[in-house]
Image: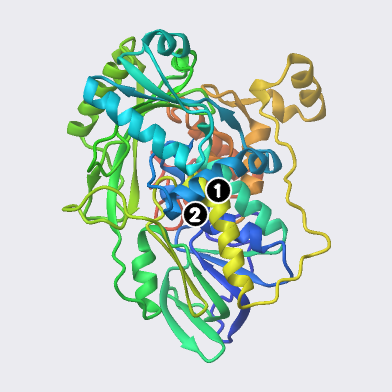
Amino acid sequence: MNYFGLFRAIVCVYDTSMKHVDVIIIGAGIIGCAAARELSRYQISVAVLEKEYDTGFGTSSRNSGVVHSGIHYRSGTLRAIHAVRGNHMMQQLCEQLQVPFKPTGKLTVAFDRSQCEELKVLKAQGEANGVPGLEIIDVERMQRLQPGISGIQALYSPSTAIISPYELTIACAESAHHNGVEFHFGHTVSAIDRAEDGFIVHDAEGLCPIHAAIVINAAGLYADSIAQMAGIQGITIYPCKGEYYVLDKRLGDQLDVLIYPVPGHHSSGLGIHLTQTVDGNILIGPSTAYSDSKEHTGTTSEILRALRAAGHTLLPTLSEGDFIRTFAGLRPKLNPPEVGGFGDFILEDHDRFILLAGIESPGLTAAPSLALEIVALVRSHLSLVEKQHWSGTLPARERFLELPLDRQQQLVEQDPDHGSIVCRCEGITKAEVLQAVDRIIGPVTYTGIKLRCRSMMGRCQGGFCIPRIAQLLEEERGITMDQQQLKGPGSPMYHRHLRPEESTS
């Protein structure tokens, strides 16, 4: 039975005894979860510590979901190497984990002659990185690939694709968990002590310390703080906010390829662009603005006006009624505001403390490749023997709305809950919501349900389905209204009843 605030993972609550594992991974974003899955292949014990109450609640769920080709990164850098290798690995990984993967290609669009020269530079850099199929194309070819597009020339990169970033992160975590990795949510690391044979990791909640031979720092925005706890100085993470608009699904058929502008030399991002999602929406964004906070993901009216204008420039057919939602994510940048641009990834082994820092874009693309590199570093300290019965695949998950009518009828006959629609906008059934609840490996939250089945993601943004989900949680899983949380303890969905409950006497 799932309850808010209760953990499925084994947790040492109010126990002063030491817990021992071979490897601790700090951070349950895409890098930490991909590494956990790869390490789960071997006969070692692995624990993941995450300050949030689910996997992928941070940067890993707040990005464009683009599988980058590798054209934007200087040759020989870790960013270039792992972007290209990760791109090659991604489709097979998504097939194994039942995560949607859609090859789209990308147009990087020039609007004047000077930008046309930049396209040549990008093409040469991409080819040096091993990116296949790059072409500089004219207006006629651009219009065939994307009718209505603006610009005078474009670089076409056919290996660019899109995925659902939160679904991949969750699937990597589920795969790792099914293969024996422990996940400890709501654990904020507060101290790391070096021991003769490894490390002792403490958390702010005062639960039991954990001893590990190896610590992997995949803490994203907080990688600098975790590194300092281990005695590693000189790493500073600068949060950089990117804001987005989400467009209504009715526009999904109007965007055939991803559309990017030519980035500026000192830009801290790749420019505001149009991106499809695997679920049929279009994203406009992200903006690029350094932030003083590693937690604040609110949007601003000034930036949103700029996003609207940029969207109309790239795709003039947009109308004001097409904009349905906004969100923002934070990039963990290594370069300070006065420098801008991109720093290279950091992946270093400090005597069994494996440090990853500055894993911003293309971190999602690079994740499967970085995971292999992490395993290689762990192998240099531990003997890694493969498990005989490791499983790298997850069961297929059918989306009811996307199924043919005869299959839908079959499912309803097997389980009447498939015949009850909870989320009208996305066509999500009662059965799918309950399946999402049962997949959660930490505390059940509305955000966790949302990321697993897309309820609350449609045009009404939960206006219709949230009351029904509240009722389902109470009646079907015994989670009362006063226990229901948005993102975990401290974020209650409901403050009190609007009117007094009827007396039962």
Relative to the observer, which residue lies in front, 301 or 139? 139
Does the residue at mark 1 contact the one at mark 2 (Cβ under 8 Å)? yes
The reply, left or right, for residue 397 in relation to residue 303 is right
First in residue order: circle 1 vs circle 2: 2
Relative to the observer, which residue lies in front, 403 or 205? 403
Residue ID at (59%, 23%):
427
Residue ID at (46%, 44%):
61
Q: Position of residue 304 (x, y in %)?
A: 24, 30
Q: What element carries label 1?
A: helix
The reply, left or right, for residue 273 in relation to residue 366 is left
Q: Residues within 10 Å of mark 1 (few under 14, many from 20)?
A: many
Give the total of numbered labels: 2
Q: Name the residue under label 2.
A: 29
Residue ID at (69%, 72%):
44
Q: In which quarter of the image is residue 295?
A: bottom left
Q: What element carries label 2?
A: loop
Q: Name the residue under label 1.
A: 169
Q: Quadrant of the N terminus?
A: bottom right
Q: Which amino acid does label 1 sit on?
A: Thr
The reply, left or right, for residue 311 in relation to residue 20 is left
Residue ID at (38%, 13%):
138
What is the spatial separation of the Cα atoms under label 1 and label 2, in whole angstroms? 6 Å
Q: Where is residue 490 in the image (x, y as percent from the top left)?
A: 40, 57
In this view, 237 is above or below 241: below
Q: Residues within 10 Å of mark 2 (few under 14, many from 20)?
A: many
In this view, 470 is above or below 489: above
| Residue 54 showing in the rendered view | no
Q: Where is residue 312 in the image (x, y as percent from the top left)?
A: 28, 16
